[in-house]
Amino acid sequence: MNSTANEADVVMAVVVREDGMILAVERRIKEGSLGWAFPGGKRESTETEAATAERETFEETGVRISATERLGSWVHPNTGKHIAYWRCDYRDGIGLVREPDKAADVNWFEPNKFLSMLDPAAVVFPGVLKLFTSNPVLTRTPTATQMDNCYG
């Protein structure tokens, strides 16, 4: 399936296991205040956002996923990149650094632990915070700083 003009250039995968843990990648080189992030990357011109989420997650971590729901997109206020976020179901794999030139670590975290590890200046996409607070498996309360940094 070919992409459409309104699809984002970069896609991030919010991978959720049945136990509520989420997958994160620590960048080898921070992009501004962004150190830990969801797996993701640039969309190829011939692929959909969902396919990008699945491909990038496997390439970076060895984890196989199914992209199930588009949480939304925005032009990131810090990077200026048009980024789409997809909620993804875990299928298999343990999560390993498969691109050591790009990633220092790969790990599974509780959502609140992941958010607490972010730089205070990090801006979190509102759709991700909504997922973390509305899904019974992921329920947690965002910090005041995360809510203050939420653009929406």
Image (cartoon, helix red, strand yellow):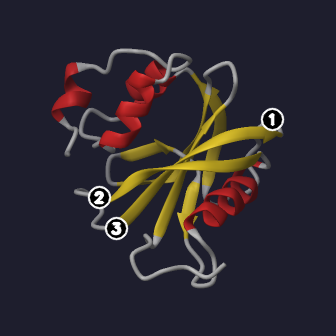
**Residue 53 position by quadrant:** bottom right
Mark 1 vs mark 3, CA separation in Å: 29 Å
- Numbered mark located on residue 81 in the image: 3
Q: Position of residue 96 (x, y in %)?
A: 77, 42
Instruction: Point out the image quarter for the C terminus.
Output: top left
SS class, disc 2: loop
- Residue 94, label in figure: 1
Disc 2 marks which residue?
A: 76
Residue at image point 66% right, 65% down: 51
Mark 2 → mark 1, Cα distance in angstroms? 29 Å
- Write down the quadrant of residue 48 in the picture: bottom right
How many neighbours does mark 2 have within 10 angstroms: few (below 14), some (14-19), or many (20 or more)?
some
User: Is residue 8 positioned above or below 101 on the image?
Assistant: below
Q: Check contact, mark 1 vs mark 3: CB within 8 A.
A: no
* Mark 2 or mark 1: whose residue is earlier in sequence: 2
Which quarter of the figure is the N terminus placed in? Answer: bottom right
From the viewer's side, name the closer residue of 54 and 1: 1
Is residue 123 placed above or below 141 in the rendered structure? below
Q: CA distance from mark 3 to mark 2?
A: 5 Å
Can residue 124 be seen here? Answer: no
Q: Amino acid at mark 3?
A: Lys
